[in-house]
Image (spheres, rainbow, N blue to C red):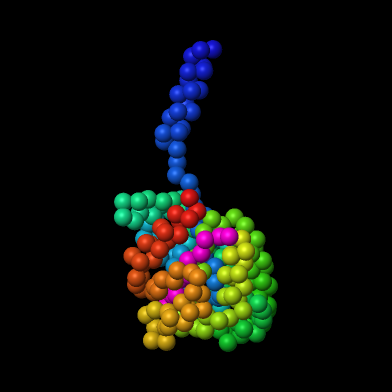
């Protein structure tokens, strides 16, 4: 009996000293084709050597929530584990005709539109599980859209820490200042997920964001 109690006590103490780090659930949200999956892929490639999903110029390429567990990121002698959750692009309306210019036939376009709509519903449900969220916006597009304001508004209502990423700064039309002006209460970091530009600043901002969830 005494031996068993001692064994259980030792096990508990061992667990306290060598407890695994909390895995921070990190969601990627934003409108279609802003670069959510490209950024998630870049992070996964940097720290696991693998990708999380497929990237395409066709809208709503990501139509289901996809995630990668235990992605350990190190920055300036700190290390944190994340569960990366890449979500479908949020849109107020999805029409199958949007896919026709990409040489997708009507039947498959209708199927794709249905899947994308279901993906948006799934993405919104996942919000309740997020510890922190990165809102990825296309720096060449007008940030003052109903979709962007709705996404950020939902995050604020849930009191989820937010980092706004202005993606595609490698393009001439990119304008980070517009995004900063649209969301003055949030940290905004400009990157190119495709070319890995400014990722050091991104990781620094990510660790600051994660601190708010610890």
* In this picture, residue 128 sits left or right of residue 171: right
- At which x and y percent is residue 142? 52, 84
Q: How many marks?
A: 0
The answer to which image quadrant residue 51 occupies is: bottom left
Name the dominant secondary structure of the magenta segment.
Answer: strand
Which residue is at a point 54% across and 12% down the rendered structure image? 1
Instruction: Find the magenta span and give its range.
Output: 159-168
- At which x and y percent is residue 116? 63, 72
Which residue is at a point 37% across and 50% down the rendered structure image? 79
Q: Nearer the viewer, residue 101 or 9?
A: 9
* In this picture, residue 3 sits left or right of residue 152: left
Q: Tell me if residue 37 can be seen.
A: no
- At which x and y percent is residue 134? 49, 65
Q: Nearer the viewer, residue 159 or 171?
A: 159
Q: Is residue 155 magenta?
A: no
Of all residues, the one furthest to the front in this rendering is 185
Q: Nearer the viewer, residue 146 or 23?
A: 146
Q: Tell me if residue 204 can be seen.
A: yes
- At which x and y percent is residue 26? 50, 58
The answer to which image quadrant residue 29 occupies is: bottom right
Which residue is at a point 39% across and 55% down the rendered structure image? 73
Q: Is residue 162 magenta?
A: yes
């Amino acid at each position: 009996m005494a031996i068993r109690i001692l064994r259980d006590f030792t096990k508990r103490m061992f667990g306290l000293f060598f407890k695994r780090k909390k895995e921070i659930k990190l969601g990627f949200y934003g409108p279609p084709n802003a670069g959510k999956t490209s950024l998630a892929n870049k992070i996964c490639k940097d720290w696991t050597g693998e990708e999380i999903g497929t990237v395409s110029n066709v809208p709503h390429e990501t139509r289901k929530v996809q995630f990668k567990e235990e992605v350990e990121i190190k920055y300036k002698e700190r290390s944190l584990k994340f569960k990366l959750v890449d979500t479908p692009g949020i849109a107020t309306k999805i029409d199958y005709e949007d896919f026709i210019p990409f040489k997708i036939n009507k039947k498959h376009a209708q199927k794709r539109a249905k899947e994308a709509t279901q993906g948006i519903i799934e993405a919104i449900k996942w919000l309740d599980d997020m510890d922190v969220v990165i809102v990825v916006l296309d720096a060449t597009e007008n940030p003052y859209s109903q979709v962007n304001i709705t996404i950020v508004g939902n995050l604020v209502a849930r009191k989820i820490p937010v980092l706004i990423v202005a993606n595609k700064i490698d393009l001439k039309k990119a304008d980070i200042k517009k995004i900063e002006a649209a969301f003055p209460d949030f940290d905004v970091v400009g990157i190119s997920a495709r070319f890995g530009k400014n990722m050091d600043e991104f990781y620094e901002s990510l660790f600051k964001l994660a601190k708010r969830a610890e």
